[in-house]
Image (tube, grey):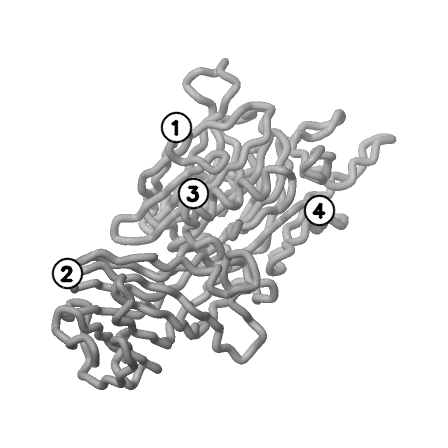
Amino acid sequence: MSKKWTRRSALALIGSGAGLLTWGTGGFTDVTADRQVNINTTPDSLDHPRLGIKTLGDGGGPGQRVSLITFQNNLDEEIGVNLNAATVDSDDTTEVADLFKGEGIDPTNYFDAPDSVGPEEQGMIEATLDLLPDVSIGSDREYDLLLDFTAGTKNENQTITLSRKATVTYEDPRVSYWDFEQISGRTVSDIWSGNDASRKYVGRIGPFRYGYEPDPADGGNRGTVLDFRGDRFRSGDDDVITTSDTSKLDFTDDFSLSVWIKPTSIPNSYARLFSKWDSPRNNRDSDAEKGYQFFLGETDDKFDNKFEIGIETGQRNGKTTKIKTGATVDKGKWNHAVWTHTSSKESEDRVYVNGDHEGNGYSGNLPDPYGSNEPLRIGNGIDGNDRLRYPFNGLMDEAKAYDTALTSEQVKNLYETSKGGDGGSIGG
């Protein structure tokens, strides 16, 4: 060996089993120091005196960043890292380009690896999940990735070539999507999972036949949208689309609601966008107030041509938490509104308007909602006597529900890919 193998210049790895890599058991390892040498040693850890490497069992949905391998450089000189090859070890035809976002035919283009890792520093191999083309709605699946990479000192007289396995859990958060393009008579189709909603049959008065309300309308570049403004013969105060009472929409932990709206007025205090809510019957049964509501209300300045977004959850003990978020949407213009709720000991809620929750949005926390026996209503909500009293007045498009709290990047992706009128994707 032309260079002495020392504690300072040697490179070592840590092991798999419980998330770690080991010499001789986690994969193929070549160590080169001017000539190739085979080395076998005991398992190490991230605080190994030379180099530590740890695989990370990460997961998420489209548009989310996943971390696959962490490097810890415990030498006193810089090392370089290069990803040589990447494949998906799967029993189907899923490839790297299906699972992750990137460009080109080289699978390594779909990953981010550090060019160098300084002394006492860490680096990661990461990637961003894409929307799988043939994945089942709402399904979770694990994928094993085989990653071949090289780590070595910058003078390249000592390198290690590794082949290791990392596992990614792909989590599809989609629950329901009413695009308002698929309407037949009473039925408003859920194109994701069959939670179809229904419209009200208004019937006939005199010579005028009203049919079903709310009516489809031409939304310009948005295509077909729903018009909750009624028509020239009647108001839209009782316009609503209603789903069945399904447990899939009984969100009691993480969830997100998304919709495009072009509001014109607030007919009665609040305009419900999404309402899965048990109200106290005849204002007596306080224990019945459960569920969640996403709505609009007037701002403090009624002449600013804006409406304020509100969010509300009802808990099992009959308590409710209602927040006027301060986030606003413009009257008479298309706005993208998203509410995300993260369930934890310290829950977190965010409201985004046109992809933004910092400049014009909200960050706070509401308790988790308790499951409601009422159906999900879109575009209206009931009072304590089960009467529709809180209509949305305006145009609506692309109502969606997810069973996760979307990340800021996912919300931004959804806004950017749907603002032109398409359905959009959280994967970008």
**Element under label 3?**
loop
Q: Is residue 213 visible?
A: no
**Element under label 4?**
loop
Look at discs 4 and 3 and give the one toward the viewer.
Answer: 4
Asked if labels 3 and 1 touch by Cβ distance under 8 angstroms, the answer is: no
Q: CA distance from mark 2 to mark 4?
A: 62 Å
Residue with the most extreme top position: 303
Disc 4 residue type (three-letter): Glu
Residue 373 spot, x, y in % from top left = 48, 54
10 Å neighbourhood of mark 3: few (<14), some, or many (≥20)?
Answer: some
Q: Is residue 11 left or right of residue 403?
A: left
Nearer the observer, 43 or 338: 43
Instruction: Name the residue: 52% across, 63% down.
Output: 138
Residue matched to label 2: 76
**Element under label 1?**
strand
Residue matched to label 4: 181
